[in-house]
Amino acid sequence: MMRFDKSNDVLGTVNRGNPTEASICTLCRADCQGRCETWLSSLVGRKLLYPRSFGIVTAGANNTTHVGVSYNSLRIQGYAYGAHGLSKGLTNAADDCIFPNVSLETEFGNTMKTKSRMPLMTGALGSTFVAAKYWDSFAIGGALVGIPVVIGENVVGVDRESTIQPGEKRKGKIKVSPELDRRIQTYLRYFDGYGAIIVQLNVEDTRNGVAEYVVDKYGDKCIIELKWGQGAKDIGGEIQVTSLDYAIFLKERGYVVDPDPTRPEVKKAFEEGSIKSFARHSRLGGTNLDSVAQVRADFMAGVDYLRSIGFKRITLKTGSYGMEELAMAIKFATDAKLDLLTIDGSGGGTGMSPWNMMQSWGVPSIILHSKAYEYAGILAAKGQKVVDMSFAGGFVLEDHLFKGLALGAPFTKMICMGRGIMIPGFVGSNIEGAINPDVKAKVNGHWSELPKSVREVGSSAKEIFASYFDVEKKVGKDEMKNIPYGAIAFYTLADKLACGLQQLLAGARKFSVKNIARTDLMSGNRETARETGIPHVADVNDESARKILHS
């Protein structure tokens, strides 16, 4: 089921560690000096869509065998005639039917639509220190591209500068939350009507009154997201801390901290060095519910409450649980008229999920997403307006975007990308710190000088980032001094993904991403065809082919 080798001679890329099914390393390091495909795409952008050394090489695909069931076992259909979804003013003349004319704009939502310049959104970037350190790159990059960015769980709870006091509506009332404010305001500074800032709620966030704080301060500028789970693990979110004092603070904030930093023997072990870190965990939700009926009642009451305090857009994030939970998520989100349902398959994550849990638990993405389409179709056949969906779980490259959108069409409006979209934040920050040592600490750069892998591309930001002048045109020369290099790298990677997606759509004769369909896919083996409902390559259009032969 693996499509990716450790190195790709055609593109001149190599993975430092073991490549996942999605192409990036199983362990993606912020200080990495390259150069996997996503890393290098953050610099050279759409150039990496093509083989290197043009004019002196020929190149051929090595992906001829499909084994097992995965997104890599799906192939994209192409057609020799036709044109569908052309924008107003365009005709089916050859001069108009070119891939740059493919529209990637999409939208999601029930009554209040959220527009996005391309069908991409970030995963939830919450209380992990990686998310905090590189937030400016992620948020500004996402806002400039015009896609939704998600603030994950526990941001308020882990912030030592936040003030939480007893309140009337919930168990906690936030008075001050500097980190949450920073994250929201950074995105909104560059928001131009496309994309959105989404704030996620878990058990602790609900207790602390995060929803009340956000709606009181930002109104409908933010989308609120209920969280059931994720594809990385089947327990609450976690981070690791190396300070005893901070671990005690988090326990006093109401979190589960392991080992318990208040136990005398644990304190002694930390002082002597045998314990060097603590894991902070969130709680499981729904533990007081014993039936589907109770889950539904609790969920609908929660949605009603969020609407009553002023939220106009509400979404749900669910993980790779089994089929019952998947059906509940789709049915309840549809009945509640939510704006988006993100369905995250196993396994991956942006935090510190237990490794063997990531390896062993939950439903793999392609199976989960195939069943999501099937269940959504059941509701649609009954005349219901099915909730818009976003698929997550291992998407990195432009063909992944196409396949996820097509597999869930017409219900899937977005692809949620987690680890892959964080890489440009890392590499851009490292480059900025190496070029401008005075800001190295501020941008969390890891390099003292530019490595050979970057110097081969250039030595200044204008040389290194293919999209530098696109960003400059968007924000103006004067504002460029405020744009972190990580955001420029983010924009550059997004440009490569957008161009690649446009090319794939044009080949399928779809000139709007809104016209993508399951018929644009083929299964590379019979097992994948059986599990996904996508016909085998030899069966697709076989009947119409025979009619041509017999005509």
Image (tube, rainbow, N blue to C red):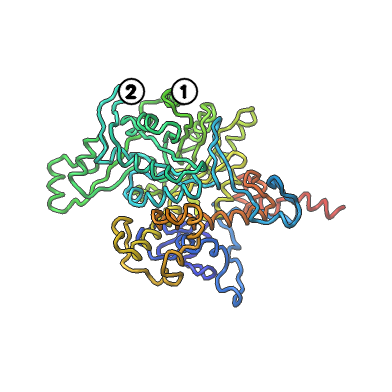
Answer left or right for 396 relative to 350: right
Residue 64 position within the rendered picture, expressed as x and y whole percent measured from the top left: 61, 63
Please give the residue where the numbered disc 2 appears in the rendered image. Answer: 169
Where is 462 relative to 397, above or below?
below
Work out which residue is located at the far front of the displayed protein and give it.
478
Instruction: Evaluate whether residue 21 shows in this view.
Output: no
Where in the figure is residue 479, as x and y percent of width and height?
42, 53
- Up the image or down, 177 lies above or below 45; here it is above
Q: Quadrant of residue 504?
A: bottom right
Q: Is residue 459 above or below residue 516?
A: below
Q: Nearer the viewer, residue 367 or 190?
A: 190
Going by the numbered disc 1, the residue's amino acid type is Ala
| Relative to 17, 253 lies left or right | left
Judge by depth and name the residue closer to the eye, 36 or 65.
36
Q: Quadrant of residue 174?
A: top left
Which residue occupies 32% across, 25% down?
170
Q: Is residue 260 visible?
A: yes
On screen, residue 159 versus residue 454, left or right, reads: left
What residue did someone put label 1 on? 293
Residue name at image x 17 percent, y 53 percent: 274
Which tag, 2 or 1, sits closer to the chain's start? Answer: 2
